[in-house]
Amino acid sequence: MSYCSDITRNRILECAKREFLSKGFENAQVVEIAKLAKVTTGAIYRHFKNKEALFFALIEEVYNHTLDVVSDVEKRSEHKTIMTDSDLVDDEAIIENLFLETMQFVDYMYAHFDNFKLIFECSKGTQVENFIEDITERYTAKNIKLILFNAKQEQINTEIKEFEVHVITKGYITSLCECVLHDIPYDNVSEYIRSIVVFQYYGWQGLLRKNNK
C-alpha cells in the first residue's frame, strides 16, 4: 500500500469514526463518510469490503485485545482456590490485587475510549453488537467452573443457580462498561472501580459461604 493510499485510508477511518459515534452503525451512511473524507464511495470500497468491514477496522485492535484478556483470565482461574474463611486470608490484599488488575483493563479502555464507545454504544447491526453479553457468557462459564472445582476442595455453597451466576457476572461486566457509556471522567474512575471490586469480592464471599453456618 502506497504512502498516499495510507493517508487516504487513515482519513477515511477518522471520518468513519466520527460518523459512527454520531449516528451508530445502522444509521451511518458510507456516502456521508465519503463526503467527510473528501473521497468517492468507490475509494472507500477499495479499502474496505463494506460498511461493516469499515466499522470493524476501527475496533478490531481493542476487540482482539479484550478477547485475549478474557482468555488469560480463563487460564489463570483454572484450579484456582476460592478461600471463604476470612480468618485465613488477607481480604484487603486480595481486593487490592483485584483492583489493580481491573484498573489495568480500565486504563486500556480509557486509552482507546472512542473505540470502546463504538463497541458498547454504536455497534447494533454488526457482528459485535452482543459483545457485552458474549463476554458475560464466557465469564459466567469461568465462574461456574471455578465454583464446581472448589466444591470438591472445601465446604462452599454450590446451590447457586447458573442464572444467578450469570446475573451477578453481567452486573460486574456492565459496571466496567458504564465507565465508557456514561463518560465518567478518568479522575473519578479509580474510586468507582474500587467500590465495584469491594462489592463483588464480599458479595461472592457471602454467597459462597452462606450455607456453611
Image: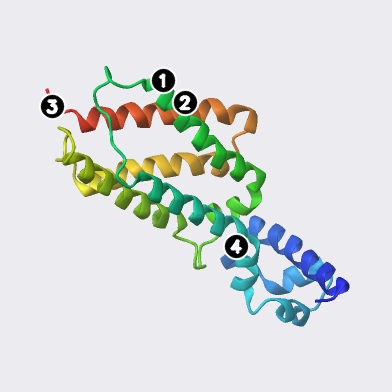
Q: Left or right: 199 with respect to 105? A: left
* Element assignment for label 1: helix
Q: Residue at x 17, y 34 (%)?
A: 154
Q: Are marks 1 and 4 in contact (CB under 8 Å)?
A: no
The kind of residue tagged 2 is Glu
Give me the C-alpha separation between circle 1 and circle 3.
22 Å
Q: Residue at x 43, y 44 (%)?
A: 173
* Element assignment for label 4: helix
Q: Is residue 38 above or below residue 191?
A: below
The numbered mark, 3 or 4, whose residue comes first in the sequence reads 4
Q: Quadrant of the C terminus?
A: top left
Label drawn at residue 96: 2
- Which colour scheme appears in the figure? rainbow
Q: Position of residue 48 (x, y in %)?
A: 68, 76
The numbered mark, 3 or 2, whose residue comes first in the sequence reads 2
Q: Based on the displayed image, in which of its 4 quarters is residue 16 positioned?
A: bottom right
Give me the C-alpha separation between circle 3 and circle 4.
46 Å
Q: Are marks 1 and 3 in contact (CB under 8 Å)?
A: no
The kind of residue tagged 1 is Glu
Give me the C-alpha separation between circle 2 and circle 1.
6 Å
The numbered mark, 1 or 4, whose residue comes first in the sequence reads 4
Q: Which residue is mark 4?
A: 60
Q: Which residue is mark 1?
A: 92
Q: Nearer the viewer, mark 1 or mark 4?
A: 1
Query: As rendered, which of 65 and 131 lies closer to the eye?
Result: 65
Query: As rendered, which of 51 and 166 lies closer to the eye?
Result: 166
Q: Which residue is mark 3?
A: 212
Q: Is residue 166 above or below residue 203?
A: below
Q: Are marks 2 and 1 in contact (CB under 8 Å)?
A: yes
The kind of residue tagged 3 is Asn
Q: Residue at x 76, y 82 (%)?
A: 42
